[in-house]
Amino acid sequence: MNLSLKTAIAAASIFACCAFLLISSTRVHANGGTGLLLVVNKMDSTLGMVDPEAGKQIAVIPVGGITGHEVAASPDGRTAWVPIYGDAGVGLPGTDGRTISVIDLASRKVTATIDLGAPSRPHTIVFSAHNDKLTDKLYVTAEVTQSIKIIDPNSNKIIGSIPTGEPQSHMVAISSDGTRGYSMNAGSGTISALDLQKHQLIKIIPVAKTIQRIAISTDNRLVFTSDQTRPELDIIDTQTNTVTSRLPLQNIGYGVTPTYDGSKLLIAHPSADTVSILDLHSMKIEKVIPVPKAPQEIVVRPDDQVAYVSCAGSKQIAVINLASLKVEKLIAVGTGPDGLAWAPTK
């Protein structure tokens, strides 16, 4: 084979390799924004499946209990879990749920029920993925038993329990490496730092008289929650497990969610019908966006291009373009939309 032919073959191979990498990169980026949005229609006791591109709810699945508030989805987009909390608000008299409904998203049916073994008021459920699928875990808050239950998502069996040391452990956030958890204890106004490997309570962190919602930063360094007695975002340093900053807000905050690149935090304000965009580098609010009535929860699409906001008072999902920082679409869903999750599709 002569030199020119060898050179031509080498060049063709390099071109093909580069083309493959470019296509693969494009595909990964595209898949980051491909999926279905899941929404818990709280007052309907259903899970809604939303096609975000078409801008409509395409299926409604009864979750088999009164009532679910939150939802988690598996990373492969095949399964969802909805804890059945009960018929009351946090800290109020009412029934105490004890089950979690397991939904197959392909057949759009509840295929199993996980019984927690006692009245628990399970509320928030978080999927923690690991390199080995066999070690994937679900963490669910159990308010009545003041604990976080650990569930094997492959067998739907309870495999552990972590005490929070406080009542009304309403929400939980998990570090990206699956080693630390932080429960938001609404009525006591505290956050419990948890060791997920040793199943132990590390520290109870006093925050405010009463708080709501919780999120952890992309780099696992900060935990965010909203004071419910004053318009203030409280920020906890995960290295010291202390409140290190209290950021004034225009209105009382609620659901908080960081972007995947770690640059922004989105904050819902139910009483003001707005969402604030906090720049996490400057720690300044860069935009306040009007949305429909009573925004609750926010989920960011994995490509960081879009955020979805459940608006309980209007039966809608507000779709925020994170480049223009404007609502670009409203999607009609069921009554009392609350918990959200992203279910990727292939």
Image (tube, rainbow, N blue to C red):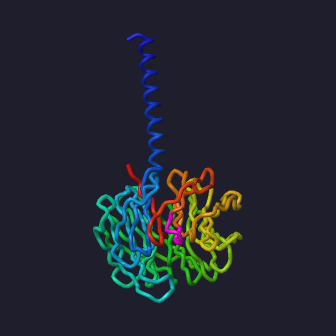
Number of labels in the image equals 0
Q: Main secondary structure of the magenta part?
A: loop
Is 166 above or below relative to 10? Answer: below
What residue do we see at 48% from left, 35% from top?
A: 22
Up/down of 302 relative to 14, above or below: below
- Location of residue 335 (image quadrant): bottom left
In the displayed structure image, the side of residue 155 where residue 49 appears, left or right: right
The quadrant of the picture occupied by the N terminus is: top left
Decide: is 259 above or below 100: above
Query: Which residue appears farthest toward the bottom when viewing the image?
Result: 93
Residue that appears at 47% across and 68% down? 339
Kindly tell me whether residue 198 is visible in this rendering: no
Residue nearest the observer in this picture, 108 or 240? 108
Residue 87 in sight here: yes
Find the residue positioned furthest to the top: 2
Determine which quarter of the picture holds residue 138: bottom left
The image quarter in which residue 65 lies: bottom left
Asked if residue 173 lies in the magenta stretch, the reply is no
Q: Which of 339 and 135 is in front in this view?
A: 339
x, y (%) of residue 32?
A: 47, 49
State the extent of the magenta-drawn residues as a range: 311-316
x then y, percent, for residue 77: 38, 57
Could you say which is closer to the camera, residue 49 or residue 33? Answer: 49
From the top left corner, tell me how far across and down residue 193 is, in percent: 54, 74
Q: Position of residue 222 (x, y in %)?
A: 61, 65
The residue at 51%/85% (across/down) is: 91
